[in-house]
Image (cartoon, rainbow, N blue to C red):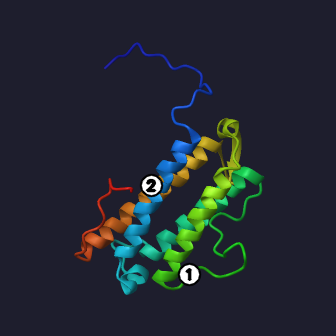
Amino acid sequence: MQTNATLTAPTTDAFISTSALLDDWQGHRRLTRRLIEAFPEEAFFSFSVGGMRPAAALVTEMITMAVPGVRGVITGQWPAAFEMERRDGKPLPSTKEEFLQRWDEETQLLNEYWSQIPGERFQENIVFFGQWPGTVNWAILYMIDNEIHHRAQAYVYLRALGIQPPFFYDRS
């Protein structure tokens, strides 16, 4: 199929406001939290399908990316990609309840850090986690996409365990 559409240079016009983008992300985070809650404790740490990592490892990646990523956007200082230790030196959670508590703490930090990103920064070029070049917009969308991707894997796990996962469209 041939089209006469032409591409234009990117503009600073916003498709979505920064506050609406955060609201959307936080909706995904609320859904992911409900997904974590749905897992039996043992399965959260051990169950996998087709060689994929267990849900706890997937959630660990989400935790070690989101807040450190947004903080890196603000400060320009990037931890090692997917740093496995908490910023205060505490190890990552070892129970599902600790994961949920950590998830809630990270959600609050995400709100606090987000408010420190000036709107014009979203078009700026960065090197995400010191490794991947792109705009701030790209990095934020990557973090959201990463969470959705890993949440989808965890949906497969719950279904394989015979557990009804939360409805993907309910982000309330």
Q: Residue 86, relative to residue 118: is it above or below?
A: below
- The image shows residue 148 at horizontal and vertical percentages of 43, 56
Q: Residue 57, relative to residue 19: is it above or below?
A: below
Residue 150 in view in this figure: no
Q: Residue 63, relative to residue 95: is it above or below?
A: above
Q: Residue at x 67, y 81 (%)?
A: 90
Q: Residue at x 37, y 65 (%)?
A: 153
Q: Residue at x 55, y 37 (%)?
A: 17
Q: Nearer the viewer, residue 70 or 149?
A: 70
Could you tell me the amino acid type at mark 2?
Answer: Gly
Q: Residue at x 54, y 54 (%)?
A: 143
Circle 1 crowding by C-alpha within 10 Å: few under 14, some 14–19, many from 20: some
**Furthest residue toward left:** 162
Give the number of the disc on residue 131. Answer: none
Residue at image mark 1: 93
Question: What secondary structure is marked by label 1?
Answer: loop
**Furthest residue toward top:** 4
> To which quarter of the image does residue 63 belong?
bottom right
- The image shows residue 4 at horizontal and vertical percentages of 40, 12
